């Protein structure tokens, strides 16, 4: 029996991956070229330019990192932090917590500012911590995938600027689904993932580092602990006149990401944001009459990821059992809660290609069939 | 203008990537399922079993790491080494040197045993260093992709065993192209890459850790410096009854790797090894009359990667110019030398699907046309 067997069709309405567009799938089926082929280098250069548009930045060091969003997070932190450096991390979900953990493993002295999961970080508490610690780095999550919270950026960025701290922003779930403006906000390092609003396969992490971040890295006293994620080594392959081998870039995943970014640019960012907003509205309007309640207050919600507390009927049937039935009988994946929210919420993603009326209606119909 | 444009057809005879088989390309064009979908978990389990066969191991912790071979190297070293630990690394090319560098960045005290690039490590020198240092870890490269040298494993493994050191083996270029026998050899951690003799796209690193290595990791006093590569966290997703989210596995790359491993198992390892040996013989028999000379003595050569010193005629035309002409006029990629061998050698890969008479003959004909 082969390892690879036919796989079921799925409508992916969890926290990612989302369904890839046919043009992305077609791209990933193309024959390979080499990672040092001039044609591939040219493709990478065009992709870097496209990613700059998505990130709202002119950062030269904007590139598709050869691993998932978690590696992008690690790249941002281990490049900007040296052992003993101070960092203030906002934690209101899994991914803020993960940032703090990665920073600790990089030898940093970590101060966390916590907020209840499902709420935003308090800008005043963040600003107080920042002015007290005067950290080397401030890090927080723009779109917290574990809760569906969208964090306002400006006030925290302003506080970081006042103490001249470097600013890291997690844009894994926001990029290409709602506005990301690195240059306007003054972000020094940001990372995303290919499998959310870009609707590509998981495995690539678009990252962007400001010129100031690059200077900071060049002045490090200690080498970056990760050779694989060392930006000054990566720069030799991704930038400059002579591209030299660092690691072998994932050719197929790059094709897919390029096709995904092409889709975004064709559609236009504004239209895409609007599509995400409309789809979320339609979803919530359908779910609330069934007894689902949004975890997050309206003004802080992410359009691409709606987290909902479950009606009693779901609890009676068993929330995991209902999700299994959705998957087995209707081919629809939604996500469960993580950490303290496990069993208490679902996370419903309408990301990228799935931020349309049809996927919403398919999910609502299936839920009516199971729950009514 | 789109980012992704038509790409030229290439015959990839460099040090990797090799051309992917059509079944691998077809697999990578398939629609996505989720990384926690029971069907995907079942696929991962079958893939892990297939990789065990390729690695010659019963190691439970054999899995497709979600990044390139360089990340596999880093995973092996940062999981097994703690700050202050001693390690003996054999260095006879780029990848041995990279191992030493990664180990230094993990805070290890590194002793290197060097050999001239293009020759094997001296087993007696390695054994002497090992018995003198009595290191926590011994690390070396099975198939040195920068030189085309195949390192005999047993004698060094024996020396490591005598001091109870953990043994790490780089199998990036050897896996599925010549025998790899982790259990027979007593290897504790090994890693490979998807884009060499497996003929898949770059971006995945099959890795294998012995039970002893896992116990060693569980007894660590310090956390693994890389969160992304921490094997005890990865185990929560790749093993056990309840699979929990760590990072989002690269779905498409996993499909491709599964299809690639299926091809290997269908063909049979012995037949595949024989095909690599025959192709290398045909290549060398064609190149030597043209004035190319093998860098490596016959008994130490890797069949899947032949490194050759260049005839005067290539020097006259300029070796990079000849490679450019091969690429532009004939669509054939071969690799240049790295480090001290840059400009002095070519590295010609006949890996996986390309280890056949036709690619060899296409290259030889093109070279005759350019050089005669």
Image (tube, coloured by chain):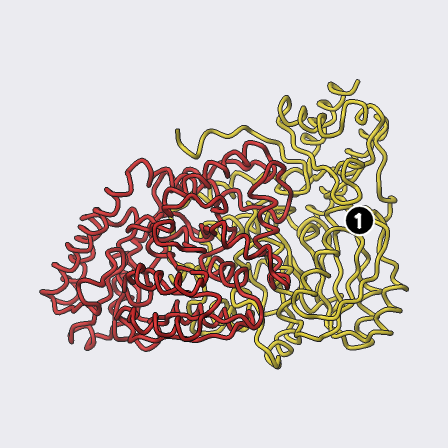
Chain colours: A red, B yellow
Residue at 43 percent of width and 60 percent of height: A168
Q: Residue at x 40, y 59 (%)?
A: A169
Residue B58 percent location from the top left of the image: 63, 68
Q: Secondary structure at mark 1?
A: strand
Instruction: Tell whether B15 sits left or right of B200.
Output: right
Residue nearer the viewer, B95 or A90: A90
Q: Quadrant of residue A96?
A: bottom left
Depth check: give the residue in front, A125 or A91.
A125
Instruction: Quickly name the residue at label 1.
Output: B149
| The C terminus of chain B sits in image quarter | top right
Residue A335 shows up from this direction: yes
Q: Nearer the viewer, residue B325 or A171?
A: A171
Measured from the top left, where is residue A361 in percent x and y? 17, 53
Front residue of B72 and A100: A100
**Looking at the image, residue A265 lies above or below residue A306:** above
Q: Residue B292: x and y, percent? A: 83, 31
Residue B332 point in image, percent of width and height? 65, 29
Residue occupying the point 78% across, 20% down: B371
Q: Would residue B342 appear left or right of A236 to someone viewing this image?
A: right
């Amino acid at each position: 029996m082969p390892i690879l067997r036919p796989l079921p069709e799925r409508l992916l309405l969890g926290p990612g991956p989302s369904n890839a567009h046919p043009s992305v799938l077609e791209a990933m089926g193309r024959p390979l070229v080499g990672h040092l082929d001039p044609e591939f280098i040219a493709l990478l250069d065009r992709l870097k330019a496209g990613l700059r548009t998505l990130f709202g930045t002119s950062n030269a060091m904007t590139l598709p990192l050869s691993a998932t969003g978690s590696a992008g997070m690690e790249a941002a932190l281990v490049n900007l932090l040296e052992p003993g450096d101070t960092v203030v991390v906002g934690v209101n979900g899994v991914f803020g917590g993960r940032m703090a953990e990665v920073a600790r493993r990089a030898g940093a002295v970590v101060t966390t500012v916590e907020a209840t999961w499902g709420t935003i970080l308090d800008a005043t508490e963040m600003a107080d911590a920042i002015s007290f610690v005067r950290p080397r780095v401030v890090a927080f999550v723009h779109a917290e995938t574990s809760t569906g919270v969208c964090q306002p950026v400006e006030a925290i960025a302003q506080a970081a600027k006042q103490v001249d701290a470097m600013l890291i922003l997690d844009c894994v779930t926001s990029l290409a689904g709602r506005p990301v403006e690195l240059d306007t906000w003054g972000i020094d390092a940001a990372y995303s993932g290919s499998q959310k609003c870009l609707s590509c396969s998981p495995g690539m992490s678009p990252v962007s580092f400001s010129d100031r971040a690059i200077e900071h890295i060049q002045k490090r006293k200690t080498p970056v602990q990760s050779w694989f994620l060392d930006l000054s080594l990566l720069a030799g392959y991704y930038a400059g006149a002579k591209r030299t081998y660092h690691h072998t870039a994932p050719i197929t995943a790059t094709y897919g990401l390029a096709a995904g970014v092409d889709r975004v640019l064709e559609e236009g960012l504004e239209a895409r944001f609007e599509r995400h907003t409309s789809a979320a509205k339609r979803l919530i309007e359908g779910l609330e009459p069934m007894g689902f309640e949004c975890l997050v207050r309206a003004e802080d919600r992410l359009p691409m990821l709606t987290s909902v507390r479950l009606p009693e009927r779901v609890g009676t049937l068993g929330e995991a059992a209902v999700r299994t039935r959705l998957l087995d009988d209707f081919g629809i994946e939604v996500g469960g809660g993580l950490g303290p929210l496990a069993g208490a919420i679902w996370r419903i993603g309408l990301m990228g290609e799935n931020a349309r009326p049809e996927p919403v209606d398919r999910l609502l119909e299936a839920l009516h069939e199971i729950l009514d």
